[in-house]
Amino acid sequence: MKFKYKIVIIFFCFFSTVKAEKKLSNSKLDYKKFIYGYSFSGFGPTWSEHLCKSLDYNSLKPFKCKKANDNIGNKSIRCSLAEKSLILAAYLTIDDCKRDLQMSTEGDNS
């Protein structure tokens, strides 16, 4: 009987540690290295060549940042912004920003 309890405790501790590590890895995301991007609300932005700009994180105040599922090999992040339920799309380079934005809005009339 004691053996069963030990297995349950070990199992619980293992999965609790795994969950904690996943949360910790998201909190270690250095969003400030993603220096170009744009903000949008709703489903997504409308294509504009001038939409990708340098980001000012002091005024944006992003939170809940996570790796994005984008069109360029998951090289970007998405963050929530406090202002009007906006979403921030941030990229390492301006070319990545423009390429992903263009690919995700293909078919839009510009």
Image (tube, rainbow, N blue to C red):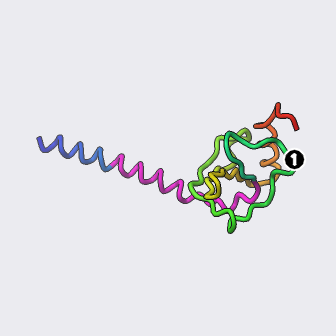
Lateral position of residue 53 relative to residue 43, left or right:
right
User: Which residue lies under the disc numbered 1?
Assistant: 49
**What residue sits 38% from the left and 52% below the top?**
17
The quadrant of the rendering that contains the C terminus is top right
> Would you say 91 lies left or right of 20 here?
right
Could you tell me which quadrant the N terminus lies in? top left
Image quarter of residue 61: bottom right
Q: Residue furthest left?
A: 1
Magenta residues? 14-37
Q: Position of residue 19 (x, y in %)?
A: 41, 49
- List x then y, in percent, for residue 79: 62, 53
User: Which residue of the protein is positioned furthest toward the top in this rendering?
Assistant: 107
Near-viewer residue (64 or 41)? 41
Picture residue at 64% right of the left edge, 41% below the top? 69
Q: Quadrant of residue 53?
A: bottom right
Judging depth in this view, the residue of 102 and 43 nearest the camera is 43
Say whether residue 16 is magenta.
yes
Asked if residue 102 is positioned above or below residue 50 in the image, the reply reads above
Disc 1 crowd, CA 10 A, few/some/many (<14, 14-19, 20+): few
Magenta span contains residue 63 = no
Choose between 41 and 23: the one closer to the eye.
41
